[in-house]
Amino acid sequence: MKRDINPILSVKDLSVTFNSGSNYYQVVNGLSFNLFPGETLSLVGESGSGKSITALSILQLLPSSAKIGNGSIKFINEELIGKPESYMRSLRTRKIGIIFQEPMTSLNPLQSIEAQVGEVLEIHQGLSKQEIKPRVINLLEMVGFKRIKQRLHSLPHELSGGERQRVMIAMSLALEPEILIADEPTTALDATIQSQILSLLSDLKKRIGMSIIFITHDLSVVRSFADNICVLEKGKIVEHGSVDGIFSSPKNPYTKKLLLSQPVIKESNKDEIDTELLSVKDLKVWFPIKDGIIRRTVGYTKAVNNISFLINKNETLGVVGESGSGKTTLAFAILRLVESLGSIEFHGQNINNLSKKEMRKLRKKMQIVFQDPYGSLSPRMSVNQIIEEGLSFHLPSLGHKEKRDLIKSVLDDVGLNYKLGERFPHEFSGGQRQRISIARALVLKPEFLVLDEPTSALDVSIQAQIIDLLCQLQSKYKLSYLFISHDLRVIRSIADKILVMKNGFSIEQASSSEIFNNPQDSYTQSLVSSFK
């Protein structure tokens, strides 16, 4: 690739330190790289390697507990470290855009998606209201958003994780920045939409000469997308080179480990599966579409339509489908977090008829790990307090030492040191926050656990560890899982049987081996084909 003599962005000897009480720890250590005009540079590494902190340092968006110790960050030869906030605010909106890893915390929960995307255009491009709406629709079309005109007034919580991510991407692309920092932009997206987004970013880069810093934990995502790769480990770059060079001849042992990390295919546990635990029959979830001055119901968004399935003890049902297919809504309905019609039997009891007070008693047995860990963790509570909260509510008779031992044990299970429990969620990487969410759910030892994209924010090596952990816990306690994912590699490594969803309907349902080896529906065949 032909480069200009001067880089558009130059980072040299960057070091970032976090202050936690009286303790200091370094998360970025002597980091240096250049980004050239029209180049896509990928920062790759496991959770906690310093990728996102590096991105936030460039835009001077670090939390108050973080401090740049030394180093230089230059945009077109102008030093950014020490610039006033007014200057950086202008730079962020017009010159350097960013797609954050967790869209739910970046979107205003009280504004519609039309208002949020339109606000960017109104403030920074001065478009009129008549000009804004078609441009918003165009941007949402570009990122593969479906049923746009019917969803313009939707709030962020009414969208799937993938849909929220696409709204964030649309907002970031609205001003066509010179540099786009994409922090795990395809993490929550299924394989087909992931490919569309990467193609979109590539086309935009060619059209306007935009440079991209692409942050990911998955080397396979960047193989056909990036020009060059920096591999990060513990805040340092351990290998830097072209995509072809890194994939064909990796030099560093850590890089080789990342390339070899893949979830393994789950062996059948058919002989171990016990009695029926959960039975769902003809489940429907319809959301009203309101319009007009008095907000009259003019139709319905049919998120879930007549879904039926069984989950036994010690069994995992994998739910797959594209973003917006109804996977998360299905899970919320089962847990009685959204209203639904149909039968939901847990231990033979129809829980769809229970009162809120009666359901509260069942919460200990039915837990959930949400897709967006940062949005589900209280920013004002330490990790220990977050995990202890469920114990205090459901097991009030436990003493301090018993709670402490349980918290320490579950943190060990998910690969976190108990000493880290005094920190707050913002002091962890996205992958580490997901492990905290898993620990919070597992500490109560539930019988049934809903896992909504629990590994989407994790690098491939940690994915394998979490899957292995979940399998061990399932075998030990005969847990039942409803495991939602757009990643068929992950589904194949944990699911006993699979439910394929599209537009709220069950397209196909069979054992994992049957789905992967002999899919019957054309849609399932296309999903399996993209996986292979």
Image (cartoon, helix red, strand yellow):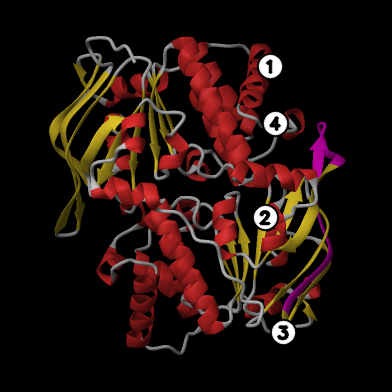
| Residue 186 percent coordinates (x, y) | 51, 39
Residue type, label 1: Pro
Pick whichever of labels 2 and 4 is earlier in the sequence: 4
Disc marking residue 152: 4
Disc 2 + disc 3, Cβ < 8 Å: no
* Horizontal side of residue 32 vs 135, given as left or right: left
Of residues 89 and 272, the one drawn nearer to the viewer in this rendering: 272
Residue type, label 4: Leu
Q: Where, by quadrant of the figure, is residue 461 drawn?
A: bottom left
Is residue 156 visible from the viewing direction of this image? no
Separation (CA) of disc 3 from disc 4: 45 Å
Pick whichever of labels 3 and 1 is earlier in the sequence: 1
Residue highlighted by disc 2: 516
Separation (CA) of disc 2 from disc 1: 41 Å
Residue type, label 3: Thr
* Horizontal side of residue 210 vs 107, given as left or right: left
Quick check: 91 above or below 461? Answer: above
- Mark 2, other Cα within 10 Å: few <14 / some 14–19 / many ≥20: many
Stretch in magenta: 277-299
Residue highlighted by disc 1: 134
Residue found at x 79% / y 55%: 508
Disc marking residue 275: 3
Of residues 263 and 162, the one drawn nearer to the viewer in this rendering: 263
Quick check: 527 above or below 240? Answer: below
